[in-house]
Amino acid sequence: MAHETGRDTIADPSVVTTRDEFGWFVEEVLRDYVDAGRVEWENSTVERLLDALTAFSTAPVETDVDYDQEAPSGRLFAEMVRAATGYE
């Protein structure tokens, strides 16, 4: 998702269903960061990324998504990482 000041990672969290897939997702996030994310992401420092992860994790749960946002899962963790790269 593009924002006025930056973008999210291009890694796709919707394909994550297993622990291994979560690992591959994180590798893709890192690859995106190295390729362009450090310049293009909304939150391209560890401090900003963790701040956004905290904000997203404690934000109200959205009702129009196709995964359970309360049950821990690889997909949920991947969605949280993706969101943290661009959450304003």
Image (cartoon, rainbow, N blue to C red):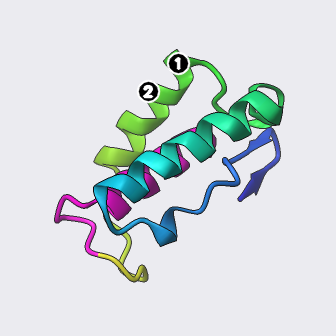
In percent of the image, x 72 and y 40: which residue is there?
A: 32
* Residue bearing the label numbered 1: 46
Q: In this view, does 13 lie above or below 47?
A: below
Image quarter (top left, top right, bottom left or bottom right) of the C terminus:
top right
- Label 1 amino acid? Val
Disc 2 is placed on an element classified as: helix
Is residue 24 highlighted in magenta? no
Q: Distance between the residues labelled 2 and 1?
A: 6 Å
Q: Where is residue 71 in the image (x, y as percent from the top left)?
A: 16, 65
- Main SS, magenta region, reads helix
The answer to whether any part of residue 67 appears in the image is: yes
In percent of the image, x 19 and y 64: which residue is there?
A: 70
Disc 1 is placed on an element classified as: helix
Which region of the structure is painted magenta? 68-88
In percent of the image, x 71 and y 59: which residue is there?
A: 1
Give left or right: position of 15 versus 87. left
**What is the crowding at mark 2: few (fewer than 14 residues within 10 Å), some, or many (at least 20)?**
some
In percent of the image, x 42 and y 46: which residue is there?
A: 23
The answer to whether any part of residue 88 appears in the image is: no
Q: Which mark is residue 50?
A: 2
Q: Is residue 12 above or below residue 46?
A: below
Judging depth in this view, the residue of 27 and 10 nearest the camera is 27
- Label 2 amino acid? Leu
